[in-house]
Amino acid sequence: MRIFSVFAALGTSLAVPVQALAAGVQRPIPNPQSATAEFWFFTASIGLLLALAAVHWLVARR
């Protein structure tokens, strides 16, 4: 059992310097949306609003 703790300590001491040498994370920069994508997003938004209005109208009638 003691040998496992020695290996754990050795493994930890070897892993720490490797992590210290890791490069920093660079966040990706998103690309701007195209005009076509904006058009379809607008169309989907209008469709969602119409669907919500239809559900509101159907539920309010009950």
Image (spheres, rainbow, N blue to C red):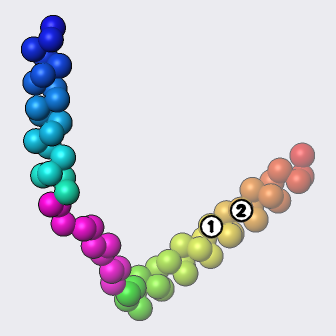
Q: Are marks 2 and 1 in contact (CB under 8 Å)?
A: yes
Badge 1 element: helix
Question: How dense is the environment of label 2, judged by Cα within 10 Å: few (below 14), some, or many (20 and up)?
Answer: few
Question: How dense is the environment of label 1, judged by Cα within 10 Å: few (below 14), some, or many (20 and up)?
Answer: few
Residue 48, label in figure: 1
Most extreme residue toward the bottom, as rendered?
35
Residues in magenta? 21-31
Q: Main secondary structure of the magenta part?
A: loop
Residue at the spot 33% in from the left edge and 80% down from the top edge: 29
- The answer to whether residue 27 is magenta is yes
Q: Is residue 56 left or right of residue 47?
A: right
Residue linked to disc 2 = 52
Image x and y of residue 38, in percent: 47, 85
Badge 2 element: helix
Identity, as a three-letter code, of the amino acid under mark 2? Leu
Image x and y of residue 48, in percent: 62, 67
